């Protein structure tokens, strides 16, 4: 592992309120791991006692147990030991950052009941589809929506949180792994998502690495352009993570591709399936000075493994990734 990488990982972890200790020896590991033809698999020894530190990033909060991107989901994630919570960011019509995964409100709120006529009609595979875009609503309107009942009646009344509220709730208890979501879409509508994110962080005194050791900040994106704007145009020194999936993944994960990533990011977050058949990518990324934090680990889809805990342990120990993004923080192996 290169010295450059060790320093980077140290910075990413500096201030992490919970340094996760994974004691391999206590894990009972089944035989369910498929090595997919690579070097991956089979290295865990039940008797071995090795300590590995890794970061637990709670995907949309503890989203297996509470409605994603509600304060309840973030609170639960922290209670379950998350090092970071992961808000996706969208922008309201009046320019306020909110925590929401989709561009639209209809999957996770009751917008169709509250504002039945406020949809746009998109054409999908030749068919008209009604969509309630968050950016067509002012914050005051979005705050009238119920973002919890879809998940369970006990969460009825939960609101879509502002990014500023997420920061206030999480501050001092965990880090924030914030994602600029669809920044190009918002750019087309006249919004500068990257600037809004940095302004919000600045207003909380969190726009510099190490500003609050109890609340480390990472910004992530599927958009390389968004990360380049953050680094080159806006000059942030915060850790930046490039989310990798889709048809370009192979190219980005090559040795040459990872060096290109290093020009605008400090880490990669590939979808977990990309690493299963390419375990060498982890060392390659480390050699390029990049951290590696794959996604998304969930009990409902612990592919090829007997349990989610086992799957996460395999990625941490066999592959040597630096952390995991999971819907089930309570099942993170420690
Ligand atoms: O941070 C990784 C993960 O959040 C990316 O996927 O679609 O859940 O935002 P998505
Ligand atoms: Ca995300």
Image: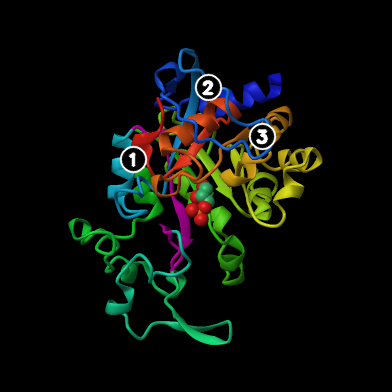
Question: Which residue is most to the front?
Answer: 31
Question: In the image, which is nearer the foreground, mark 2 or mark 3?
Answer: 2
**Image: 265 above or below 19:** below
Specify start and end residues of the magenta stretch as a single range: 81-100
- Name the residue located 56 percent from the left edge and 46 percent from the top edge: 220
Residue 264 in the image, given as x and y percentages of width and height: 70, 43
Q: Assign a secondary structure to mark 3.
A: loop
Question: In the image, which is nearer the foreground, mark 2 or mark 1?
Answer: 2
Question: In the image, which is nearer the foreground, mark 1 or mark 3?
Answer: 3
User: Is 98 included in the stretch rendered in magenta?
Assistant: yes
Residue 101 in the image, given as x and y percentages of width and height: 45, 59
**Image: 260 above or below 287:** below
| Quadrant of the image containing the C terminus | top left
Q: Quadrant of residue 237?
A: top right
Q: Earlier in the sequence, mark 1 or mark 3?
A: 1
Mark pair 1, 3: CA separation = 29 Å
Image disc number at residue 77: 1
Q: Assign a secondary structure to mark 2.
A: loop
Q: Earlier in the sequence, mark 2 or mark 3?
A: 2
Res. 171 visible in picture: no
Which residue was labeled with disc 2? 44
Image disc number at residue 331: none
User: Is 196 included in the stretch rendered in magenta?
Assistant: no
Image disc number at residue 279: 3
Q: Is residue 280 left or right of residue 57?
A: right
Q: Earlier in the sequence, mark 2 or mark 1?
A: 2
- Name the residue located 51 percent from the left edge and 26 percent from the top edge: 13
How crowded is the residue under tag 3: few (<14 C-alpha within 10 Å), some, or many (20+)? many
Residue 234 in the image, given as x and y percentages of width and height: 64, 48
């Amino acid at each position: 592992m290169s010295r450059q990488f060790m320093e980077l990982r140290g910075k990413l972890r500096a201030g992490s309120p919970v340094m996760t200790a994974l004691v391999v020896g206590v894990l009972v590991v089944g035989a369910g791991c498929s090595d997919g033809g690579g070097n991956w698999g089979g290295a865990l020894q039940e008797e071995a006692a090795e300590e590995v530190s890794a970061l637990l990033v709670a995907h949309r909060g503890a989203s297996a147990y509470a409605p994603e991107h509600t304060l309840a989901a973030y609170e639960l994630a922290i209670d379950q030991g998350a090092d970071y919570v992961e808000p996706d960011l969208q922008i309201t019509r009046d320019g306020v950052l909110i925590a929401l995964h989709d561009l639209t409100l209809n999957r996770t709120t009751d917008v169709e009941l509250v504002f039945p006529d406020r949809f746009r009609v998109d054409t999908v595979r030749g068919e008209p589809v009604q969509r309630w875009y968050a950016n067509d609503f002012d914050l005051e309107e979005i705050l009238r929506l119920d973002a919890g009942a879809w998940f369970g009646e006990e969460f009825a009344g939960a609101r879509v949180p502002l990014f500023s509220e997420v920061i206030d709730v999480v501050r001092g208890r965990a880090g924030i792994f914030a994602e600029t979501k669809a920044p190009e879409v918002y750019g087309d509508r006249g919004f500068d998502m990257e600037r809004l994110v940095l302004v919000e962080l600045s207003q909380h005194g969190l726009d510099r690495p190490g500003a609050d050791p109890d609340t480390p900040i990472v910004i992530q994106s599927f958009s390389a352009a968004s990360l380049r704007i953050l680094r080159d145009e806006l000059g942030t020194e915060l850790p930046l993570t490039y989310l990798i999936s889709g048809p370009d993944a192979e190219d980005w994960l090559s040795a040459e591709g990872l060096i290109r990533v290093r020009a605008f990011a400090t880490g990669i977050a590939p979808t977990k399936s990309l690493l299963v058949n390419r375990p060498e990518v982890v060392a390659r990324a480390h050699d390029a000075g990049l951290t590696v934090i794959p996604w998304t680990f969930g009990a409902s889809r612990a592919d090829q493994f007997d349990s989610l805990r086992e799957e996460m342990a395999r990625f941490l120990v066999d592959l040597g990734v630096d952390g995991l993004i999971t819907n089930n923080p309570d099942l993170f192996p420690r």
